[in-house]
Image (cartoon, rainbow, N blue to C red):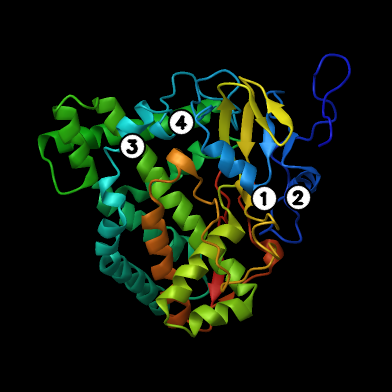
């Protein structure tokens, strides 16, 4: 691998900035600079907004090995952690940014509703939500913004029902969620948006403490009453689940639709098949191909780690660039091709190891329902503008489109 250190004292020289811009000609592909780094080797230095120079891990095998390594920490409070933006003072770290045993203690309190069995029980309700929203689209004017009319409401309705959050408040939590995950938002803006969401969820937790219902927030309040969880922790977990539960899936619905419209042969496979195995495989391939979590998963070394002839020193940060790892030709031949018949189940779109995404069964099920229904019910669905005019979320920690005008 190429030596990235200067002779003066080990300070990296000629280090590229991260994040790196995507190519305008193909907004679905990872940045070309990441591909160049991957071709050079599995590890390289990159420079962040604060001048720090963590390692970026570009290849699939090395990412999986490091994400499963107990010497690698997800704790955002540790020195050397490669934060994607300034961390607002006084911010409360969610359990996904903690290590075991605290990570495990908090995660187990919310994992029951996200098991495959419990998620499958929700499939008929999600199908009704999808069909009702399509009915409303077909009955209304066109063109229509698919993000506003469909992609955002589907997961928002689902996560609100699961958590026990009033859907009437969706404008409030969606607006504040967008600010929290915007990379270019000022720290004080993100802190204020996070504080508003925390206050909102804290109020809901207070109401559930007084009048519990059959929802996840009420189950968290049982833990609060038992002294296993503080009210502040319950509210913060609610914020995390609310943001993650609608932002990621909404972006996958809209961006996945756009990718399929740009690949009509692949869209035809979904539209003309009622085979649930093909649909499930298509979801995995779209997750691999699109990788909306394009800021990478951030980690820091707890000890010196030797990998591929390189030593990552204790206290050095790492960015697991999952978008380029999912385009590793050693694992996915023809990685830049969208192929819905590919076996893409090994992708790292949901991470790997103990911190892999808690909500992945729910996301998979929602996407299966959407991708198997939308194009079959609206077979002539098409983009109502030029690709060059579609506004992409280059400024967000979650990639997608701000709007997607469609017609039929």
Towards the viewer: 267 or 277? 277
Residue depicted at x 68% and y 66%: 387
**Mark pair 4, 2: CA separation:** 27 Å
Q: Secondary structure at mark 1?
A: helix
Residue 141 as seen in the image, left or right of residue 237: right
- Give the mark nearer the N terminus: 1 vs 3: 3
Where is residue 285 shown, x and y percent of the image? Answer: 55, 64
At which x and y percent is residue 286? 55, 63
* Horizontal relation, residue 21 to residue 259: left or right: right
Q: Helix, strand or loop at disc 3? A: helix
- Distance of label 3 from label 2 (alpha carbons): 34 Å
Q: Which is more N-terminal, label 2 or label 1? A: 2
Q: Nearer the viewer, residue 376 or 348?
A: 348
Q: Are marks 3 and 4 in contact (CB under 8 Å)?
A: no
State the separation of the CA atoms marked 1 and 2. 7 Å
Quadrant of the rendered structure where residue 340 is? bottom right
Residues marked 1 and 2 touching at CB (< 8 Å): yes
Q: Secondary structure at mark 2?
A: helix
Residue 295 in sight here:
no
Residue 35 tag number: 2
Q: Quadrant of the N terminus?
A: top right
| Residue name at image x 23 percent, y 41 percent | 217
Q: Which residue is mark 3?
A: 107
Q: Which residue is denoted by mark 1 in the rendering?
A: 324
């Amino acid at each position: 691998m190429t030596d990235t250190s200067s002779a003066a004292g080990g300070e990296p020289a000629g280090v590229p900035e991260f994040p790196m811009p995507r190519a305008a000609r193909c907004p679905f592909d990872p940045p070309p600079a990441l591909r160049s780094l991957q071709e050079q080797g599995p590890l390289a230095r990159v420079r962040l907004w604060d001048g720090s120079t963590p390692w970026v891990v570009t290849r699939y095998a090395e990412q999986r090995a490091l994400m499963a390594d107990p010497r690698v920490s997800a704790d955002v409070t540790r020195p050397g952690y490669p934060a994607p933006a300034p961390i607002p003072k006084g911010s409360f770290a969610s359990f996904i940014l903690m290590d075991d045993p605290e990570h495990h203690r908090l995660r187990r309190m919310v994992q029951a509703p996200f098991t495959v069995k419990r998620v499958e029980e929700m499939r008929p309700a999600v199908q009704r939500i999808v069909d009702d929203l399509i009915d409303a689209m077909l009955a209304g004017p066109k063109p229509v913004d698919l993000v506003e009319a469909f992609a955002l409401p589907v997961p928002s309705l689902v996560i609100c029902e699961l958590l026990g959050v009033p859907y009437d408040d969706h404008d409030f939590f969606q607006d504040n969620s967008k600010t929290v995950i915007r990379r270019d938002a000022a720290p004080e803006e993100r802190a204020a948006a996070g504080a508003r969401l925390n206050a909102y969820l804290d109020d809901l937790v207070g109401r559930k403490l007084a009048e519990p219902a059959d929802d996840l927030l009420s189950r968290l309040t049982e833990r609060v009453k038992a002294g296993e969880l503080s009210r502040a922790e319950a509210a913060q977990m609610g914020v995390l689940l609310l943001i993650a539960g609608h932002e990621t899936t909404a972006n996958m619905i809209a961006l996945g639709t756009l990718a399929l419209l740009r690949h009509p042969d692949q869209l035809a496979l979904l539209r003309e098949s009622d085979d649930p195995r093909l649909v499930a495989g298509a979801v995995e391939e779209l997750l691999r191909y699109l990788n909306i979590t394009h800021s990478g998963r951030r980690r820091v070394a707890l000890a010196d780690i030797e990998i591929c002839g390189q030593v990552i020193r204790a206290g050095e940060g790492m960015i697991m660039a999952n978008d380029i790892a999912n385009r590793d030709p050693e694992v996915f031949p023809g990685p830049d091709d969208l192929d819905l018949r590919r076996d893409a189940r090994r992708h790292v779109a949901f991470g790997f190891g103990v911190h892999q995404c808690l909500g992945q069964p729910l996301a998979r099920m929602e996407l299966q329902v959407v991708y198997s229904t939308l194009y079959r019910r609206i077979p002539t669905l098409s983009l109502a503008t030029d690709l060059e005019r579609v506004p992409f979320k280059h400024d967000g920690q979650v990639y997608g489109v701000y709007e997607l005008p469609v017609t039929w």
